[in-house]
Amino acid sequence: MLRRSTDEDISDEECEKIINPFYENYNDFAIAYAMPEVIAYYLANSFYRNAM
């Protein structure tokens, strides 16, 4: 993990405090916005190619 200007190591608590919310936001974004587009593309493409 990168920090702006410090020579200290990052503690486990700091890492969990910063990284976990990022991963939760990323998962929420992927499920809410990216996955519906991927699923729609997959269904449309397989229907168009008679693969369903």
Image (cartoon, rainbow, N blue to C red):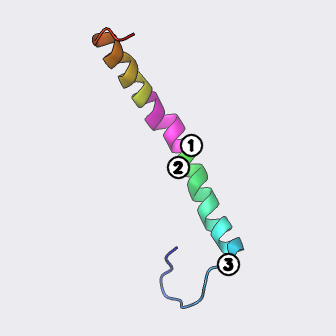
Secondary structure type for disc 3: loop
Name, please, the residue furthest toward the right: 13
What's the magenta region? 28-36
Q: Is residue 27 above or below residue 43?
A: below
Q: Main secondary structure of the magenta part?
A: helix
Image location of residue 9, percent across then percent down: 60, 85
Q: Which residue is mark 3?
A: 11
Mark 1 Cα shell of 10 Å, populated few (<14), some (14-19), many (≥20): few
Mark 2 Cα shell of 10 Å, populated few (<14), some (14-19), many (≥20): few
Identity of the amino acid at label 2?
Tyr
Picture disc at residue 28: 1
Residue at 39 percent across and 10 percent down: it is 52
Name, please, the residue furthest toward the left: 49
Q: Gap between marks 3 and 1, in whole Å?
A: 26 Å
Along the viewing direction, whichever of 46 and 33 lies nearer the viewer: 46
Q: Which residue is mark 2?
A: 26
Horizontal placement of 16 versus 6: left or right?
Answer: right
Q: Could you say which quadrant of the image residue 7 lies in?
A: bottom right
- 3 or 2: tag closer to the N-terminus: 3
Image location of residue 44, percent across then percent down: 34, 16
The residue mark sitting in front, 3 or 1, is 3
